[in-house]
Image: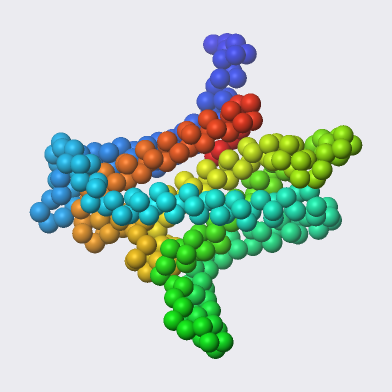
Amino acid sequence: MAFTTDTRKRLVTATLVAPAAIWLFVFLVLPFMAIVVFSVGERAPEGGYQAAFTFAQFANLGSRAAAFRNTMLIAPLGAFLCLIVAYPVAYYLAIKASPQYRLLLVSLVVVPFWTSLLVRTYAWMYILGSRGIPNLLSMIGIEDVRLLNTPGAVLLGIVYGYLPLMIMPIYVSLEKLDRRLLEASADLGARPVSTFFGVTLPLSLPGVMTGVALVTILLLGEYLIPQLLGGGKVFFIGNALVDLFLQSRNWPFGSAIAVTLVVVVVIVLSVAMRIAFRISGSRQVDLV
């Protein structure tokens, strides 16, 4: 049986895509379908899941309002602080750094990923704990300073932990920037600040939106940093899920929160893609 060129191309494409599609279906779609089923069930008397069809779990989401509020406030704020710190670093790496040292400097940005986030977070627990910065401040007469188990400590841990994920997309956008545009702007009499806001920043916005979307989405499900640096006082949705699934064993309620979180992530991603598209004027913007 002879195949046309079009058919052969489609078969090759299907063959290449099939492994990834099967992987995503088995490890992403099927588990999510199970979570959706659990979310409309009831908690069994001994804990876990009991078959039912009710939306009572979603009606009870208000009981975890503090976790939702903390997540929806601190996650975007953490992403914004990452952006404030990351953009100058990415700008220096892409525009100002010498080409012979650029690869080394970029490598140093990703070096923290070679160490477990748990180990790095424990290091910050020591630095912010009573034997760290507060102890140094007490030596110069500044007493009773508490840094650990505060929203500020959580934000610091977020910026430290997620900074490379913000730097790299912005660096890629800036590294592709046509330097002739900067030279043309300078030749036309524009000051450096005007060139930055008129040329550099607009052209790097796809990378900015990619970094902000990526960091925000990951932060919406963050568990470790609030648990260790927040000391249980700064509760995220991820902490609520661990509590419901592993401790109180209320799987249906935990599933309802997880489904709600997925919906929020999809909304955030959709909005970010729409904003990036409008700003860039091109559909070639990748956010994931």
Q: Nearer the viewer, residue 29 or 219?
A: 219
Percent position of residue 139, x then y:
55, 88
Q: Nearer the viewer, residue 14 or 233?
A: 233
Q: Place residue 164 in its image quadrant.
A: bottom right
In the rendered view, would you say 132 is above or below 194? Answer: below
Residue 135 seen in render:
no
Q: Is residue 285 left or right of residue 116?
A: right
Percent position of residue 124, x then y:
51, 72
Q: Is residue 30 left or right of residue 284?
A: left
Q: Nearer the viewer, residue 123 or 48?
A: 123
In the picture, the quarter occupied by the C terminus is: top right
> For the view shown, which residue lies furthest in the left direction?
45
Which residue appears at 56% of the width and 62% of the height?
Answer: 160
Which residue appears at 53% of the width and 68% of the height?
Answer: 120
Percent position of residue 147, x then y:
46, 73
Percent position of residue 55, x then y:
18, 38
Q: Nearer the viewer, residue 47 or 190?
A: 190
Residue 155 seen in render:
yes
> For the view shown, which residue lies furthest in the right direction?
187
In the picture, the quarter occupied by the N terminus is: top right
In the rendered view, would you say 232 is above or below 78? Answer: below
